[in-house]
Image (cartoon, grey):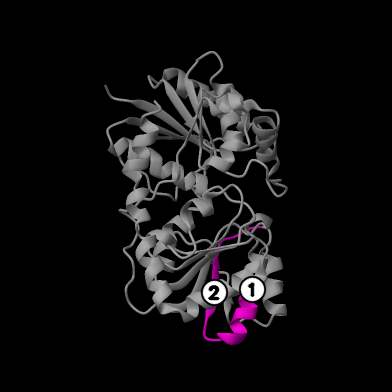
Amino acid sequence: MIKSVIFVTGSLADGGAEKVMSILASGCAELGADVTLVVLRPKKIVYPVSDKVKIVQFTDDGKLATIKRIRKLHRVLKESAAEVVIPFLPIISLYTMIANIGLRKKVIMSERADPRAQFNNLPWKDKIGNFFMRKCGLFSLADWMVFQTPDAQSYYSEKIHKKSSIIPNPLDIDKLPERYDGEREKRIVAAGRFSEEKNFALLIDGFATFHESFPDYTLTIYGEGALRKDYEMQIQELGLGGSVKLPGFASNLPEEINKAAMYISTSNHEGISNSMLEALGMGIPTIVTDCPVGGSKMFVHTGDNGVLIQMENKNDLVSAMTLIATNSRYVKHISNNAIKIREQLAAPNICQKWLQLL
């Protein structure tokens, strides 16, 4: 029997959750499922999606756009034979719950971030979603919940635990470059939204100290966000204008970073970082903070496949950078182990776990 499912997302233009959804929708379709992907906003689709996926994108914009989108989503759900709907992110889950009133489709929701975090920089609509789904407990109305990590699951009630699974993010290994085995560039890379939780200020500060001993290294941080001007000012004040680059988002991030000397994440909270997984999958020496909700410590183990450091600890960060820059034997060891994640998180394997929930 062919399994049928509807995925719902706000866009496929940017964002880690959106990228994961594009991989899941494509992977499930490639495994034989009948997949419809509903995109609520009229943003340009950036993330690739399999030709086997039926994409329904709404074009509504303006003051009444939200109401129109919910009505159209209700119509799509009503006319579809699919019995299961999977939305990502709190506000999209809230819209889906409203659209599903009277239809009784099975709704599988998913926690994609740290539920304990204070998302002060979110747009007001996302704050509404966060309030109702997390603070008011509407996630408990889901027929099933999927968590990325045990730590995220532990935040919620026993009622939710009994109807939940832990499924990590997939890696689209068909589009992920193989490990680069040549001499790596003396370039440190990071990626993410320029917001407080990513804590790139610590990375820039740590790099300034590291750069005093290793002046031939550069730092490139891919991303955009509200703190760009703050970071630009910090870079100038530290005299790093020629050594730190902020080129914006990269549509082909894996290709951009594959030859880098190291990948670093200094987040204060994170679900599971897609760029971290990609860096590991390409064997790039990886340094990450041990932050909530546990995605880093699930996949990065000091002495085995990377370096796990304390949050907000500049000394830890600089020591880890120095270790990678000076110990070629350690770099080779962790790189050899890191690429094993390609098989562990290969999209077909992860998508099969989702299909088992339908």
Q: Secondary structure at mark 1?
A: helix
The answer to whether residue 260 is visible is: yes
Give the residue drawn at x 60%, y 37%: 154
The quarter of the rendered structure image containing the C terminus is: top left
Residues at badges 1 and 2 in contact (C-beta under 8 Å)? yes
Question: Quick check: is 110 in the magenta stretch?
Answer: no
Bin the neighbour count of mark 1 within 10 Å (Cα to Cα): few under 14, some 14-19, many 20 and up: some
Please say if 318 is above or below 74.
below
- Amino acid at pointer 2: Met
Give the residue drawn at x 73%, y 47%: 120
Bin the neighbour count of mark 2 within 10 Å (Cα to Cα): few under 14, some 14-19, many 20 and up: many
Residue that numbered label 2 is attached to: 321
For residue 179, which quarter of the picture? bottom left
Q: Nearer the viewer, residue 143 or 340?
A: 340
Total tally of numbered discs in the picture: 2
Which tag, 1 or 2, sits closer to the chain's start?
A: 1
Residue that numbered label 1 is attached to: 206
Residue 32: % across, % down = 27, 32
Please say if 90 is above or below 179.
above
Q: Which residues are magenta?
A: 206-225
Q: Secondary structure at mark 2?
A: helix
